[in-house]
Image: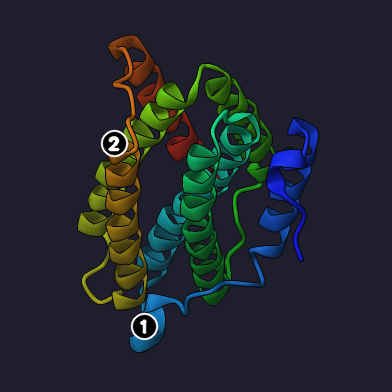
């Protein structure tokens, strides 16, 4: 039987979340949507481009895991903590699918993965300390921006790459659900300077992870 999570300290919550993230590369509760599609022969430029896009998506999922770990560790209410954990489980699926797709493309994740992870845990924890409504607002805004980002990726994929397309389409569907859940739970709209800062930081990560 698992210990009562309410008895865990903030540090315990962080360690549990980090351990779960480490396991997520090899364990997932849902098969990859890509499995229903055969591999397509891509040209070298197409393969490099798809690799860059999926590396960005993998980095984004690493960041999402870090945010959820930090936010769950500092959440004040059990309802909010459970919402974050449930969303985090689906994000673990996304992380595994992206990692699997990179392996199929004979590629590796971003070399800066530890930075995305550590920085996101810190950001998530700080946002959690602002209160649950703020933290849920951060989730809603993050998922809104991720949805737009993934939609752009769909339009940039080679037409024949149905495996990557299937993964991204399912990710979009899940992100929409996460945003709706956060809003339903009472999220607070974030001030526009915060939303702009989030877009800028996401843009920096996107450009960097695509190349490295």
Give the image location of residue 12, x and y in percent.
Answer: 79, 40
Q: Is residue 156 left or right of residue 199?
A: left
Give the image location of residue 154, x and y in percent.
Answer: 25, 58
Q: Is residue 8 left or right of residue 146?
A: right
Q: Is residue 55 visible?
A: no
Residue on which the image places disc 1: 41
Residue at 69% over, 57% down? 20
Q: Name the disc covering residue 207, or none.
A: none
Residue at 54% over, 50% down? 85
Per the model, the C-alpha gap separating discs 1 and 2 is 42 Å
Which of the two residues, 70 or 160, is positioned nearer the viewer here? 70
Q: Is residue 95 above or below residue 185?
A: below
Q: Secondary structure at mark 2?
A: helix
Residue at 40% over, 35% down? 139
Which of the two residues, 31 or 76, is positioned nearer the viewer here? 76
The quarter of the picture where residue 182 lies is: top left
The quarter of the picture where residue 129 lies is: top right
Q: Quick one: label 1 or label 2, which is nearer the N terminus? A: 1
Which of the two residues, 188 or 92, is positioned nearer the viewer here? 188
Q: Is residue 199 visible?
A: yes
Residue at 64% over, 26% down? 122
Q: Is residue 190 above or below residue 140?
A: above
Image quadrant where one finds the N terminus: bottom right
Which of the two residues, 110 or 49, is positioned nearer the viewer here? 110
Colour option used: rainbow
Q: Name the disc covering residue 183, or none.
A: 2
């Amino acid at each position: 039987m698992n210990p009562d999570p309410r008895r865990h300290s903030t540090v315990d919550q962080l360690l549990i979340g980090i351990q779960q993230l480490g396991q997520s590369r090899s364990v997932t509760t849902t098969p990859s949507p890509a499995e229903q599609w055969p591999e397509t022969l891509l040209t070298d430029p197409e393969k490099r481009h798809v690799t860059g896009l999926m590396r960005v998506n993998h980095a984004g999922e690493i960041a999402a895991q870090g945010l959820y770990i930090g936010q769950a560790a500092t959440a004040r209410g059990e309802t909010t903590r459970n919402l974050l954990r449930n969303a985090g489980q689906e994000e673990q699926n996304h992380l595994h699918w992206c990692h699997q797709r990179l392996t199929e493309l004979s590629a590796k994740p971003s070399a800066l993965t530890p930075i995305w992870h550590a920085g996101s845990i810190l950001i998530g924890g700080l946002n959690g300390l602002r209160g649950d409504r703020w933290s849920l607002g951060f989730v809603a805004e993050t998922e809104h921006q991720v949805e737009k980002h993934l939609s752009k990726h769909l339009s940039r994929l080679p037409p024949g790459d149905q495996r990557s397309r299937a993964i991204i389409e399912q990710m979009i569907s899940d992100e929409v659900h996460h945003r709706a859940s956060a809003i339903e739970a009472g999220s607070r709209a974030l001030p526009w300077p915060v939303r702009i800062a989030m877009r800028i930081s996401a843009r920096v990560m996107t450009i960097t992870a695509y190349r490295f």
